[in-house]
Every structure is written in C-alpha cells, then in structure tokens.
Amino acid sequence: MTDKHISSQFDNELNQVSSHVLELGGMVEMQIRQAMYALSEFNIEVADQVQDTEHRVNALELEIDRELSNIIARRQPTAIDLRLLLAISKTTANLERVGDEAAKIARMVKRIIDSGKARVLPAGELRMAADLAAQQLRKALDAFARLSADDAVAIIKDDDHVDREFDGFVRKLITYMMEDPRTISASLDLLTLAKAIERIGDHAKNIAEFVIYIVKGADVRHSGPDGVESAAR
C-alpha cells in the first residue's frame, strides 16, 4: 500500500468524522430552537422533543469518540494530525454540553408549567440573549467547517455581547424581585434558564478557540483579546 493511498484513506476518515461533528452541531442547534420555543410558548410537548433529542446527541457523541479512537489506533497520526483529532474531540464534547443546556431549559420549562406559575415569568426578556447565543454557535460551526481562524477570532470577541445581555437580565430580575417579593421563586427559575443560555454562548466560544488551535497550533483558551488576535495572524 502506497503512502499516498494511506494519506487518502486518512483524509476520508477525517472528512467523515468532521461531517459527524457538523451533524451533531445541527442537532444541538435544533435543540436550542425547540427549547426557546418551549419557553416562549410554555409548550410541554416541544420541551419533551428537546429531551428526546438528547439521547440522539449522546449516541452521536459516543460514535464520534469511537471513530477518533479508531483513527488514532490505526493511523498513528503525526503531531499535527493528533492536534486536529484532539481539537475535534473537544469540539464534540462542547457540542454535547450545549445539548445538555438545552435539555436543562426544557426540564425547567416543564417544571414551571407543572408549578402553575408559567405566565408570571417575563420569559420574553430572554429571547435576545438566546438568539445571540444561537448565532454564536452557528458561526462557530461555520468557522469549524471552513477552518477559518479569522471567523473564530470574531466569535471570541462577540462573546462579550452574550455576557452583557446576561448581566443586564440579572439586574432586571433583581429589580423585579425587589418590587414584588412574591416573584422571587419564579425569578430564580428564570435565572437558571438565563445561566443555561449564557453557557451555550461559552461553549460556542470554546469551539472557536479550538478552531484557532487546529489552524494555527496556538492554545488561546486563557489569552486576552490581544493574545487571541496575535495567535490567529
């Protein structure tokens, strides 16, 4: 077997596992959309769909892990290729955690509905933050598909927008609770939902950092904005 043939097989295996990562990304994006619809409409059936999808997300994560393990065992990749496989593995883990956050939102929605206090909550206030987090994830997946370090840098910079939305929402909730202490319990539930949305944005940022790691070989997880831009050049 020629080296060219081995290289071609390796490329095919990498393309397959990358396609599965993007498939996983599509599944968790759908979970986010469904979770936010369930929250805005207090729809228990859609919340159930989010939780049903969680099982498929977990199964696909395990399949990707098996594929990566098989590639490493069969191909004995070089340091550069091993870096790529490691980043793919970490990207997969972050996508699975996004699915966990969406499922958490769905479970909370069902609990709120069961409690009978659904309409007390100003759930619409969360839409902007949720939309931003979902956009961040979509951009991160696009950056992964194109292996674009420049796009990844833009995503990392934009993460501040999601954080500001979360901070602003927390301030609104504090005012809400101070004006009417009877809403404290409901507001705490909403805070849990807001935190889950913020974490989705964090995972999108993590994926962008791994894209830079794949393309440039630089670990920017604990770098400031200047360090990220410098590494991506």
Image (cartoon, helix red, strand yellow):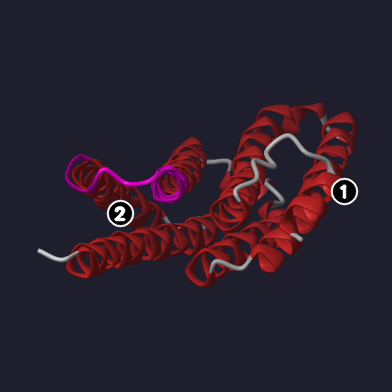
User: Residue at image x 62%, y 41%?
Assistant: 199
Judge whether 196 appears above or below 20 on screen: above
Using the image, tell me which numbered label, if any, was put on residue 208. Answer: none
Rounded to the nearest angstrom, the CA distance separating label 2 from label 1 is 39 Å
Q: How crowded is the residue under tag 1: few (<14 C-alpha within 10 Å), some, or many (20+)?
A: few
Residue at numbered disc 1: 226
Q: Earlier in the sequence, mark 2 or mark 1?
A: 2
Indicate the amino acid at tag 2: Thr
Residue 89 placement (x, y as % from top left)? 39, 44
Q: Is residue 160 left or right of residue 120?
A: right
Decide which of 157, 13 is in the foreground and name it.
Answer: 13
Secondary structure found at label 2 = helix
Query: Which quadrant does the N terminus fall into?
Result: bottom left
Decide which of 163, 1 is in the foreground and name it.
Answer: 1
User: Residue at image x 85%, y 33%?
Assistant: 174
State the predominant SS element of the stretch in magenta: helix
The image shows a total of numbered marks equal to 2
Secondary structure found at label 1 = helix
User: Residue at image x 42%, y 60%?
Assistant: 25
Query: Residue 138: within the magenta?
Result: no
Q: Is residue 58 left or right of residue 198?
A: left
Residue 163 placement (x, y as % from top left)? 79, 46
Judge whether 64 appears above or below 137 on screen: above
Residue at numbered disc 2: 53
Residue 22 placement (x, y as % from top left)? 39, 64
Q: Which residues are magenta?
A: 73-89
Query: Which quadrant does the C terminus fall into?
Result: bottom right
Judge whether 144 appears above or below 114 on screen: below
Return the residue found at the far left: 1
Q: Nearer the viewer, mark 2 or mark 1?
A: 1
